[in-house]
Amino acid sequence: MASTKDLKERYFRLEKSLGYEYRELGFLENALTHRSAGLIHNERVEFLGDSILGFVIADKLFEQFPNVQEGDLTRMRSTLVKESTLAEIAREFKLSDYLIMGPGELKSGGYRRDSVLADAVESIIASIYLDCGRNIEVIRALILTWFEGRLKVIHPGNDQKDPKTQLQEFLQARHQPLPIYTVTEISGEDHDQSFTVRLTFENNPNEAYIGYGTSRRKAEQNAASKALQVIYSKNTKR
């Protein structure tokens, strides 16, 4: 078993990214352990984290959209907590660098799969909740920070539109040129590739957004999502 000092060194950067310093790093290590690695793994805490995340996002949407009906609230919540969204957040935290997996799962590229990454995010949510003494306000504040950009972008009726479509419609409505998507890197075996895409704008080539995904389409969607978060954030401040 690793010492507290070893764990602190191993997870220092991740704690900085998460915005939370653990009292007991064993909670974090458990959250990062896939069931392929052994008897102690993250499936129980994933169950708890899923419920906490759903509650916090539902509560925020209820507050943010006081005149929106249940159906639209449900669809917006589903958009925010769906697997692909959580996998995006996991990649922002570079969770794949920290996942603990069995040799077979590692070899097959399990650390890149959306389902594995999404589960890890939910597990980390639960691990923080447990580590801070079940203080819901602590984990609520962290979740809302992680989702801040996405909460600014989300609107009733937009939930069925993917980020590329939303960005395209936003630009077209303002008679601006469409974004340029460029694949900058493809890594991994043919059956398990990872794509990096750079999104730029013709009228501002120095403004770029980098997206990642297990396909070109997913990487483009990830880049578009990041661009939308910044665009809506700028518009909100005006």
Image (spheres, rainbow, N blue to C red):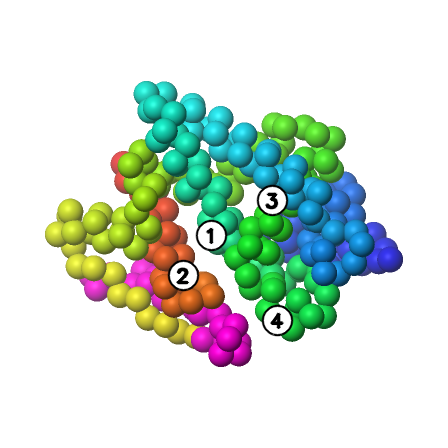
Foreground: disc 3 or disc 4 = 4
231 or 75: nearer the eye? 75
Observer able to see residue 48: yes
Range covered by the magenta-colored residues:
186-210
Q: Amino acid at mark 1?
A: Ser
Q: Could you tell me residue 199's position as x and y percent?
A: 33, 63
**Residue highlighted by disc 3:** 122
Foreground: disc 2 or disc 4 = 4
* Residue positioned 48% across, 29% down in the render: 58
Q: Could you tell me residue 209's position as x and y percent?
A: 37, 60
Q: Is residue 194 above or below residue 20?
A: below
**Residue highlighted by disc 4:** 108
Q: Secondary structure at mark 3?
A: helix
**Residue highlighted by disc 1:** 84
Hey, which quadrant is residue 113 in on the image?
A: bottom right
Label 1: few (<14), some (14–19) or many (≥20) C-alpha neighbours in 10 Å: some
First-in-chain label (1 vs 4): 1
Was residue 160 drawn as part of the magenta stretch in this picture? Answer: no
Label 4: few (<14), some (14–19) or many (≥20) C-alpha neighbours in 10 Å: few
Q: Secondary structure at mark 2?
A: helix
Q: Secondary structure at mark 1?
A: helix
